[in-house]
Every structure is written in structure tokens, then in C-alpha cells.
Image (cartoon, rainbow, N blue to C red):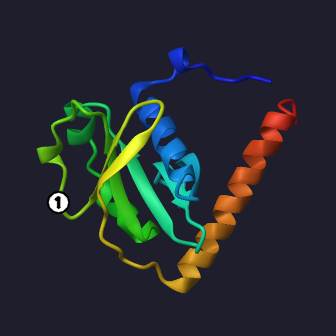
């Protein structure tokens, strides 16, 4: 079975790892690099114990953030939207109306809670099903990589 080491992960993937670890402590399960619909790929989508859905975009540098012109399209796919950056990131660049997480490869801290914008029930149901299927397919791929 192939397991990535920390040395092989990109900076954004290291941030995502720390975010996912932190969110698990809040009883949120996470899936990285998830596509809620064609043409959109979020860095982390997290599912809470009451069905709440958070999107977290991980930005490893100023240039990485400034080149992201599609983030507002992710707002329709979550109850709360966050940026995850490291402690050297210029956080004044990030929109005030979004959440802020400071992270590294091992943990994270929510510095600013994102405002809640509840998803419509039908979209939440469809999205939870899509997350479940995607997670199951990933697990099956890990267990049987030749499939």
C-alpha cells in the first residue's frame, strides 16, 4: 500500500493535513481535494456531527492566494468557509467575511470562525451522499489499488 510521507507533500497538502487533524478533534471528518461539482476542487471539505459542511482552502503563499479567483464559487457548497494558512502568511489579504485557520502539518487553530450560511436541505443531502461515495471509493482504492 502506498503511503505518502511528509517529505513528498506540497506545502498546501501539509496545511490540509494539519487542518484535518485539528477538525477531527471537533468531531469533523474531512476529505481532501474533493470535487463538489465539475470544475470545482476544494482543498478540504469537512463534515460535522450534525451534518454541517465546511470548506477550507489552504494557501501556502501570497502568490497562491492572489492566483485563486474562484474561491467565491465554493460558498454555495458549504455552511462555513475558511482559509488555512501558516503563521507567516500575510492574513490581512484574506477577506474579513471568511473564517481563518492557522495551520502546519501537525495541527491547526481556528482564529476566526466563519459566518454561517446554511446550505439548502436538498443540496446538503446530495453533497453528503457524494462525500460518502467519494470517501468509500478512496478507501476501496487504498485497499485494492489494482482494481
The image shows residue 57, relative to residue 99, as above or below, that is above
Q: Quadrant of the N terminus?
A: top right
Q: Is residue 28 left or right of residue 143?
A: left
Residue sitting at x 20%, y 40%: 66
Q: Quadrant of residue 102?
A: top left
The image shows residue 66, relative to residue 48, as above or below, that is above
Q: Quadrant of residue 61?
A: top left
Q: Residue furthest bottom?
A: 121
Q: Is residue 83 left or right of residue 46?
A: left
Q: Residue furthest front?
A: 25
| Front-lying residue, 141 or 27 | 27
Give the image location of residue 26, x and y in percent.
Answer: 52, 57
Residue sitting at x 36%, y 77%: 117
Q: Is residue 135 left or right of residue 10?
A: right
Give the image location of residue 2, x and y in percent.
Answer: 74, 22
Residue sitting at x 12%, y 46%: 92
Q: Residue furthest top?
A: 7
Q: Quadrant of the C terminus?
A: top right
Q: How many marks?
A: 1
Give the image location of residue 51, x and y in percent.
Answer: 58, 73
The image shows residue 22, relative to residue 55, as above or below, that is above
Mark 1 neighbour density, 10 Å: few (under 14) some (14–19) many (20 or more): few
The residue identified by callout 1 is: 96
Give the image location of residue 89, x and y in percent.
Answer: 21, 34
Q: Residue furthest left?
A: 92
| Front-lying residue, 10 or 49 | 49
Name the element at disc 1: loop
Amino acid at each position: 500500500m502506498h503511503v505518502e510521507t511528509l517529505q513528498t507533500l506540497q506545502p498546501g497538502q501539509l496545511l490540509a493535513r494539519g487542518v484535518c487533524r485539528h477538525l477531527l478533534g471537533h468531531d469533523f471528518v474531512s476529505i481532501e481535494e474533493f470535487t463538489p461539482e465539475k470544475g470545482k476542487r476544494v482543498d478540504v471539505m469537512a463534515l460535522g456531527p450534525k451534518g454541517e459542511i465546511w470548506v477550507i482552502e489552504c494557501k501556502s503563499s501570497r502568490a497562491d492566494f492572489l492566483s485563486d479567483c474562484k474561491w467565491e464559487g465554493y460558498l454555495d457548497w458549504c455552511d462555513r468557509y475558511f482559509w488555512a494558512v501558516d503563521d507567516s502568511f500575510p492574513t490581512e489579504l484574506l477577506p474579513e467575511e471568511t473564517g481563518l485557520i492557522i495551520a502546519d502539518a501537525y495541527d491547526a487553530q481556528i482564529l476566526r470562525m466563519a459566518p454561517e450560511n446554511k446550505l439548502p436541505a436538498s443540496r446538503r443531502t446530495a453533497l453528503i451522499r457524494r462525500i460518502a461515495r467519494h470517501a468509500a471509493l478512496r478507501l476501496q482504492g487504498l485497499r485494492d489499488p489494482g482494481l
